[in-house]
Amino acid sequence: MKNLNQKLRSFANEGKTIKIGLAGLGQMGKGIISQIRNIEGMEIIVLADRNITRTEKTLKDPGIAIRDYILLRSGRDSIRSPVSIAGLDMMADVFTENAKRRIREALDNRMLIYSDSLSVLFCVDDIDVIIDATGNPETGAYIAVNTIASNKHLVTLNVEMDVTIGPFLRDIALKHNVVYTLSAGDEPPAAKELYDFADMMGMKIIAAGKGKNNPLDREANPDTLAEYAGEKGSNPYMMTSFVDGTKSMVEMACLSNATGLKPDCRGMHGPIVNIDRFLDVFRPKSEGGILNSTGVVEFVIGDLAPGVFLVFTTENEILRNELEYLLMGSGPNYLLYRPYHLTSMETPVSVARAYFYGEATMVPLSGLLSDVITIAKKDLAAGERIDRIGGYNVYGLIDKKEIAEENNFLPIGLSEGALLKNNIEKNSPITYNDVNISAGSLVSRLRKMQEERSLQQQ
């Protein structure tokens, strides 16, 4: 099997490219466009983002500077209509015959197509792989179902969606003979690389996880972080999900579901610790560490950020001696770490693996092992509507799936737009009984189908 870079060069030398559709032009989406333009053998042919102004600004950016493109606008070039996709009734933009003609002409002339409608991604047969860089569970659910139903591979950076309905999407992708996968470069796949390496060698995993890039502030919101987010070129809501810890919870739930590792406690320990003390901290309490059990996911605040780590051990004395000889320490525990992850810059790796080899970079093993439950960020009153992840009134905490089920806790991926029926005290979990979820929520319907399948398989 050729290396991916060799495979792509050979592909390009034959005059071929992997044709890509991209959803979402935030910080990650913009990085993906710029990166793929440097890679032989793949090209983005369709962009979809609701913010037309942002898209047009991106297309004129000196680092991207795409000149030949056409715009398809919802309402002008399409009609909002009820459709049935994969047995699910939903609303979608149906493009006019004139718009379809313009799409064909643009493709024939190698012009980029962009639109404020996600539906454009699914009506272009030329697309091989769709990348979801939106980060919104409801939007991600719509993209995923339509991508798979249109027989295209899906590479997603939407970890929030994966921890909500990832097992369902994995299963239907297999039935359609396409790939559903998380994107290389995010912390969960980067940490899983370390897990797979140690697991393949028969090592016992003590803990695996990520370094958090910023201090933890559960009360952070888009107002308190507006200036900081602006300095970083990030959306204030996305930055809030980093700072209030929700993103770390989601990412480590994703790692848990793909490896079988579980959180040691609700929310994980999240110690403030530097790399030189990992082996002192990540050991059982009986040995002076912080862990109640081994085989866990974790996050740390310290000098590892923005990297990932794995602590392992072996009872084999020969291997221990060899590890000491190789300067891995005197044991019994040993540390592997990668001091970086390159986020969207690594996404093309997953695109190429999916296209050439039909391989996923990372998917849930089976059903969910961990869930991310919804916690009140402040005192909430009945009648209030929960805003989005990284917003003003909730944050997420990882917990074992069986505990979440026993207590009927509301997953963070279903929380947006839910109407509170009860008053909720600050830092208290919110349950399904505390809310009314919109009947039109696609991600909620898919979650229900996933849970029904799980019960049938038990």
Image (tube, rainbow, N blue to C red):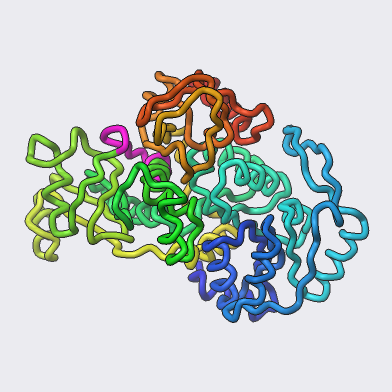
Q: Report which quarter residue 8 is drawn in.
A: bottom right
| Residue 290 relative to residue 364: left or right | left
Give 164 or 375, whichever is nearer the viewer.
Answer: 375
Task: Residue at 35% x, 31% y: name it.
Answer: 427
The image position of residue 81, as x and y in percent, is 84, 41
Up/down of 143 relative to 171, above or below: below
Give 455 or 67, whichever is nearer the viewer.
Answer: 67
The image position of residue 436, as x and y in percent, is 58, 23
Task: Residue at 21% x, 46% y: name it.
Answer: 271
260 part of magenta stretch: yes
Up/down of 265 relative to 230, above or below: above
Highlighted range, magenta: 254-267
The image position of residue 40, as x and y in percent, is 59, 77
| Residue 330 relative to residue 430: left or right | left
The image position of residue 441, as x and y in percent, is 64, 33
Q: Is residue 448 visible?
A: yes
Give 124 or 365, whichever is nearer the viewer.
Answer: 124
Q: Is residue 205 visible?
A: no
Q: Residue furthest right?
A: 98
